[in-house]
């Protein structure tokens, strides 16, 4: 203050920030002030005829490594309440939402008197700071050291207790132990947490946080098989929610952890459905991220352990993955093989005569259904049919890329499936909305068949593009 020759009222806020960032150490104070002058955070203003600084910029200063080291060396001398407060905060990483701490006020391992009793003093010591709605460590070295000084078993227990406590604030906590996965997921979105006056954290975020805490404890911490299955289902729910919000990296992380919890119980009778959903989720998320090796691993994990019908999603993703890598012939070969296993009547040859016969048969079979029959059919199509449609679509896409002679043959089956499965759904929706629907069954069939005829006439059946099976 004497060097700046300014009154106390002008430098008091700057002095407070410098004291917090240096812990009052004289050498660090000098170093910090010199650095502020060097980077022009503090500069002389000819207009004001004095040194000037932007207080907002000063408040965002980071704690230096050497200061952080000094703080770390004094951590063990902190009062028990303050240290326990820091330990719980460190379990969430560098920062935690203040509403989450408020939710943890009644947590059995929370510091006596609650977090609010200790936060101000910890802020004054420069260990943490409150930025908007976040409580943040002033330096990553501090967070790292606070976390490391917790013994491993105690740390795992702390993560476990936090995870179970937060999970109990959603319906996922207790009910998922005894209910099917889909039922637990449905209840999750009906939880009261998102409307709770005590917190602004929505239910889906709370489940992700709770599940992450369980994952930090790790599968090896839990010896009870039922707990492994329970927390695997938590990871499925968290992963599904992340995927629904297009956060595929987070989704893949949760699916992987869910699989890890079932590492000794994969594909057993009581874990079969959960395993299938975790592997499908991991394969789909990997597909969205473009990680082909992961797609192959998880898709083959499904194909090698389930029946054909349950493997259709994995087969579709595997075909898509091969196509992305430019392995179109391999994709078509795999797709045709799967369709034949599904009893599709795929001819052994692709001559023009066979193709035309397939087109005529497709048109004839589709023409058996009139507009009224389709319009009155409220059924969307069963799950198997929709899975087959996705599989056929992936095969058609691969066929198109290499002008495969199989395109008209597979396309014929795709056309009839789309007429019988998708069209009723679209008509049903339109009728429900009282929309004017100008749709002719004849046009639908004709467009599908003429598209195939056009492909045939333009050389799709060229021998150079033939595939062998």
Image: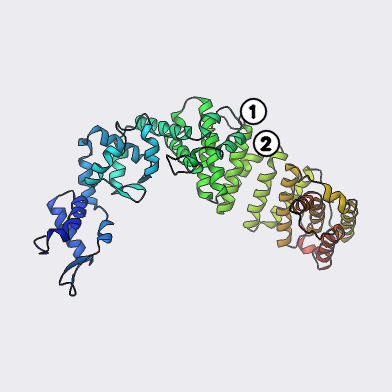
Depicted 162 relative to depicted 369: above or below = above
Q: Position of residue 6 (x, y in %)?
A: 12, 63
Residue under label 1, please give it: 269
Q: Position of residue 212 (x, y in %)?
A: 45, 39
Depicted 48 relative to depicted 121: above or below = below
Q: Residues within 10 Å of mark 1 (few under 14, many from 20)?
A: few
The disc at residue 306 is 2
Depicted 36 relative to depicted 207: above or below = below
Q: Position of residue 2 (x, y in %)?
A: 8, 61
For image coordinates 22% across by 67% down, the residue present is 40
* Disc 1 + disc 2, Cβ < 8 Å: no
Q: Quadrant of residue 4?
A: bottom left
Kindly report the distance in space between the C-alpha atoms of the residues bearing marks 1 and 2: 11 Å
Q: Secondary structure at mark 1?
A: loop
Work out whether mark 1 precedes mark 2 in sequence or the reverse, and give the earlier one.
Answer: 1
In terms of depth relative to the viewer, which is nearer, 141 or 41? 41
In terms of depth relative to the viewer, which is nearer, 142 or 300? 142
């Amino acid at each position: 203050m004497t060097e700046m020759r300014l009154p106390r009222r002008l430098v008091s806020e700057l002095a407070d920030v410098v004291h917090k960032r240096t812990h009052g150490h004289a050498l660090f104070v000098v170093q910090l002030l010199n650095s502020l002058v060097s980077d022009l955070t503090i500069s002389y203003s000819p207009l004001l005829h004095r040194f000037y600084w932007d207080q907002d910029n000063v408040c965002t200063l980071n704690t230096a490594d050497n200061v952080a080291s000094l703080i770390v060396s004094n951590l063990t001398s902190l009062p028990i309440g303050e240290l326990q407060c820091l330990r719980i905060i460190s379990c969430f990483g560098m920062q935690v939402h203040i509403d989450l701490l408020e939710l943890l006020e009644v947590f059995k391992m929370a510091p006596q008197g609650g977090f609010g009793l200790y936060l101000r003093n910890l802020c004054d010591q420069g260990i943490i700071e409150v930025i908007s709605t976040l409580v943040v460590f002033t330096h990553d070295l501090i967070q790292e050291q606070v976390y490391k000084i917790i013994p491993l078993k105690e740390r795992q227990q702390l993560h476990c207790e936090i995870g179970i406590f937060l999970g109990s604030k959603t319906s996922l906590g207790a009910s998922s132990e005894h209910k099917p996965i889909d039922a637990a997921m449905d209840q999750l979105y009906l939880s009261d947490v998102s409307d709770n006056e005590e917190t602004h954290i929505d239910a889906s975020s709370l489940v992700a946080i709770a599940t992450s805490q369980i994952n930090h404890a790790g599968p090896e911490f839990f010896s009870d098989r039922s707990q492994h299955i329970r927390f695997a289902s938590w990871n499925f729910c968290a992963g599904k929610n992340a995927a629904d919000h297009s956060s595929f990296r987070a989704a893949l992380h949760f699916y992987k952890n869910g699989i890890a919890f079932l590492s000794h119980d994969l594909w057993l009778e009581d874990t079969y459905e959960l395993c299938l959903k975790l592997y499908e989720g991991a394969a789909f998320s990997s597909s969205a991220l473009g990680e082909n090796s992961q797609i192959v691993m998880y898709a083959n994990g499904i194909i090698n352990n389930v029946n054909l019908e349950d493997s259709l999603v994995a087969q579709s993703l595997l075909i898509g993955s091969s196509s992305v890598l430019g392995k179109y012939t391999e994709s078509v070969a795999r797709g045709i093989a799967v369709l034949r296993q599904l009893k599709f009547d795929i001819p052994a040859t692709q001559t023009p005569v066979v193709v035309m016969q397939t087109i005529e048969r497709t048109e004839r079979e589709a023409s058996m259904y009139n507009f009224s029959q389709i319009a009155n059919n409220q059924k969307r199509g069963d799950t198997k049919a929709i899975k087959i449609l996705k599989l056929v679509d992936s095969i058609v896409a691969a066929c198109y890329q290499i002008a495969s002679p199989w395109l008209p043959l597979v396309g014929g089956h795709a056309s009839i499936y789309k007429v019988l499965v998708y069209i009723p759904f679209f008509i049903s929706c339109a009728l429900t909305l009282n929309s004017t629907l100008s749709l002719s069954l004849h046009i639908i069939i004709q467009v599908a068949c003429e598209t195939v005829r056009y492909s045939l006439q333009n050389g799709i059946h060229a021998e150079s593009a033939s595939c062998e099976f």
